[in-house]
Amino acid sequence: MTDRISTGMMYGQSLSGMLVRQKQLNTLQQQLATGQKLVTAKDDPVAAGTAVGLDRTLAELERFGKNANTVANRLGLQENVLAQAGDYMIRVNELAIQANNSSLSDQDRQAIAAELRSIYDGMLSVANSTDGSGRYLFGGSADDAAPFSRTSGGVAYHGDQTQRRVEVAPETFVKDATPGSEIFMRVRTGDGTIDASARATNTGTGVIAGYGRDTGGAWNGESYRIVFTGAASYDVLDGGGATVGSGAWTAGQDIAHGGVRIAIEGQPATGDAFDLGPAGTRDVFATLQNLIGTLESSPATPAAQAARQNALQAAMRDVARASEQMIDARAAGGAQLAAIDDAGAVREANDVTVQGTLSELRDLDYAEAITRFQLESTALQTAQTVFTRMQGLSLFNLLR
């Protein structure tokens, strides 16, 4: 086989070499101008694909950060609002204790009731607080309208019980503001486990001095009624009305049965009854309204005065439970804020790592790029010099 060398072939090879050098120089010029090693995806397809994935990771971290800022704002506002509500409840407790003083006149109690009405309005306003963007804090997921409104029977809740979970870091979720139903509406009465009350039809002066679980027995959650059968005797009835116990009574002494106990002072009349059983729930607004109604009453008989004292003491217990529930809600919100701070540290660490990896993939090593640029420039100049000299050559010159 004979190799054929032509002038056209030599010209073509020289031109091809110069074009390759010019292309490489052009790429290096773009890299030096942009500071990027990956000008186009074809420069390094694998690295370009990896970089796109990392860009998405950074965008996701940014979204998590925005989520965290939004939730932190709402939780911070919830903390402020609940602190104000807690101050209201402290004042209510002070007023209830003040009103339980037998030396006060009816006018004094009515003045206290007037202040309680102002607190009632303030509490309703607090419960309808917004987050500054038109969304209500305590409406759950139905936060586009005021969650609480006055009704003929008190205050109604229009939100739902949904507490949003928001992702603030990869696989890290925090809870949004607590629904208002869990703060203001479903408040346990009594001591939170057991509640006691005097029957409205009582004619004696018996007043509940205290109650709770009896350490001497196990309570199965059943309700009981203490019915006085005489000045110093009583029967215990179960939830079905059957007599399950009886005994002699002394003022202030505990009456214990079935794992629960109750102490009664004063002098109950024959037929007077006191109920003892599992604590129910009552909303804060109903507790305030009951307290206001009690203070605005003017009892004319010892029995009515005893009923008012029972109502005042029941209100103070319910106010204490409501205050505890608000404190619990504040504590839960604080825990979520701490989780947001922890998530922020995770996001920052991830962002630094991803940015470092992207820098390795994309950022140009200027020293290396300049060296390569100089080498490619020299190579191009050499190719051009060779091509210039080759232009004066011809194969015919060799045949002469």
Image: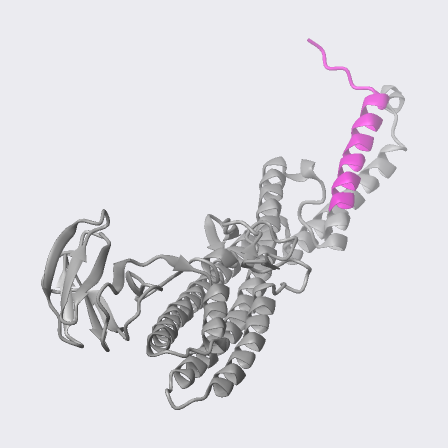
Q: Does residue 381 appear left or right of residue 212 in this picture?
A: right
Quadrant of the rendering where the N terminus is positioned: top right
Residue drawn at (43%, 57%) of the image = 186
Q: Residue furthest top?
A: 1
Residue 61 appears in the figure? yes
Residue 359 appears in the figure? no
How many numbered badges does the structure rendering display?
0
Given residues 304 and 331, the one toward you in this image is 304
Given residues 374 and 288, the one toward you in this image is 288
Residue drawn at (62%, 59%) of the image = 136
| Magenta span dominant secondary structure | helix
Residue 117 drawn above or below residue 168: below
Residue 214 location, quadrant: bottom left
Q: Position of residue 9 (x, y in %)?
A: 81, 22
Residue drawn at (75%, 44%) of the image = 27
Q: Does residue 205 appear left or right of residue 255 in this picture?
A: right
Residue drawn at (54%, 72%) of the image = 80
Q: Which residues are magenta?
A: 1-27
Quadrant of the rendering where the C terminus is positioned: top right
Given residues 145 and 254, the one toward you in this image is 254
Q: Position of residue 234 (x, y in %)?
A: 15, 64
Residue 276 drawn above or below residue 23: below
Q: Does residue 240 appear left or right of residue 248 in this picture?
A: right
